[in-house]
């Protein structure tokens, strides 16, 4: 049986994501270092960190159960499955079916839930505080993500991610451009929130009053912590792919090389922009973060309302 070329390209791009996702934090660190007039950590520092953690042993508290051990594994598995639902470079996703955007949202929610559950399993009030904050923001971020997907589905007339993002069913007029622009802006805000980046969270902080994601993984060590860090880079790459697909693919020619080059170039720009954002503004107060997420939901809702007049 012959495997379609589109499927081979999608498999290759998923493998590229698995191999290159740790580069994104390295690019961000280099951008932030350039703003501060420093050299910064090596571009491949995340690769070194994950490899070092995988060669270490793990330490487990006597209060933890199998949930704590399963948390990092299931989180990494969920994010990997989510990568299969994204139509990379505008092609049909490896895991595509009507309503797959709902499945994607639930898989990402499962990854978040397992991280929170592992944090709660430690019995630490400190990690419970981080899990509580994560759940609080998830209540606002997940509906915003679904509204964005519904706006894309309405604009394209498609019920799957592949049709929503490759422009196959979309009428690429000014209204469609406005819808995709609003959705891309909302997804960028959600990318900052879901990946614990400034202004929502600071991945480099260890101040107990401001930590969200980092506090939930304080008790993890060795391979477990390595899987968590690697899964975080995959999630960062996934959101970047969604933003590049929404903002570029419907207006590109149906040429695999052009779309692949645009995807990879767009991921580079995505990492640089996040680095610039983190270098030019401070972290928001916790009480201000919900306002930011509500703003993202409002952008998605506005995009959906525009499609109603189409």
Image (cartoon, rainbow, N blue to C red):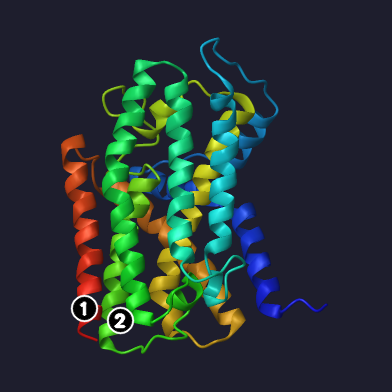
Of the two numbered discs 1 and 2 on the same chain, state the one appearing first in sequence.
2
Look at 46% across and 18% down and name the residue there.
122
* 215 vs 263, nearest the viewer: 215
Left or right position of 227 against 188: right
Q: Position of residue 109 (x, y in %)?
A: 43, 47
Q: Position of residue 185 (x, y in %)?
A: 29, 64
Q: Secondary structure at mark 1?
A: helix
Judging by the rendered image, the residue that carries numbered circle 2 is 177
* 35 vs 18, nearest the viewer: 18
235 w.r.t. 47: above or below: below
Look at 59% across and 26% down and name the residue there.
69
Of the residues tagged 1 and 2, which is closer to the observer? Answer: 1
Image quarter where the C terminus lies is bottom left
Q: Is residue 194 visible?
A: yes
Judging by the rendered image, the residue that carries numbered circle 1 is 306
Q: Quadrant of residue 139?
A: top left
Q: Secondary structure at mark 2?
A: helix
Q: Residues within 10 Å of mark 1 (few under 14, many from 20)?
A: some
């Amino acid at each position: 049986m012959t495997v379609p070329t589109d499927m081979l390209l999608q498999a290759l791009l998923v493998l590229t994501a698995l191999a290159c996702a740790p580069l994104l934090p390295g690019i961000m660190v280099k951008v932030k270092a350039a703003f501060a007039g420093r050299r910064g950590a090596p571009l491949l520092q995340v690769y070194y960190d994950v490899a070092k953690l995988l060669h270490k042993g793990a330490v487990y508290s006597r209060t933890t159960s199998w949930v704590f051990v399963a948390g990092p594994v299931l989180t990494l598995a969920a994010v990997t499955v989510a990568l299969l639902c994204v139509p990379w470079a505008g092609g049909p996703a490896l895991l595509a079916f009507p309503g797959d955007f709902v499945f994607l949202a639930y898989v990402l929610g499962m990854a978040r839930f397992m991280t929170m559950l592992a944090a709660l399993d430690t019995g630490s009030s400190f990690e419970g505080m981080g899990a509580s904050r994560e759940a609080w923001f998830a209540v606002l971020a997940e509906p915003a993500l679904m509204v964005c997907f519904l706006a894309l589905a309405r604009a394209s007339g498609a019920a799957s991610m592949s049709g929503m993002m490759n422009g196959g069913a979309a009428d690429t007029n000014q209204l469609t451009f406005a819808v995709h622009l609003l959705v891309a802006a909302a997804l960028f805000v959600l990318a900052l929130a879901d990946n614990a980046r400034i202004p929502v969270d600071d991945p480099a902080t260890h101040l107990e009053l401001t930590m969200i994601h980092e506090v939930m993984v304080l008790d993890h060590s060795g391979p477990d912590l390595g899987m968590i860090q690697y899964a975080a880079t995959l999630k960062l790459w996934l959101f970047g792919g969604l933003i590049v697909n929404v903002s570029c693919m419907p207006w590109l020619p149906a040429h695999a090389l052009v779309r692949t080059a645009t995807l990879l170039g767009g991921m580079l720009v995505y990492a640089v922009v996040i680095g610039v954002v983190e270098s030019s503004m401070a972290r928001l107060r916790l009480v201000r973060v919900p306002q930011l997420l509500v703003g993202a939901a409002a952008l998605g809702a506005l995009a959906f309302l525009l499609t109603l007049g189409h």
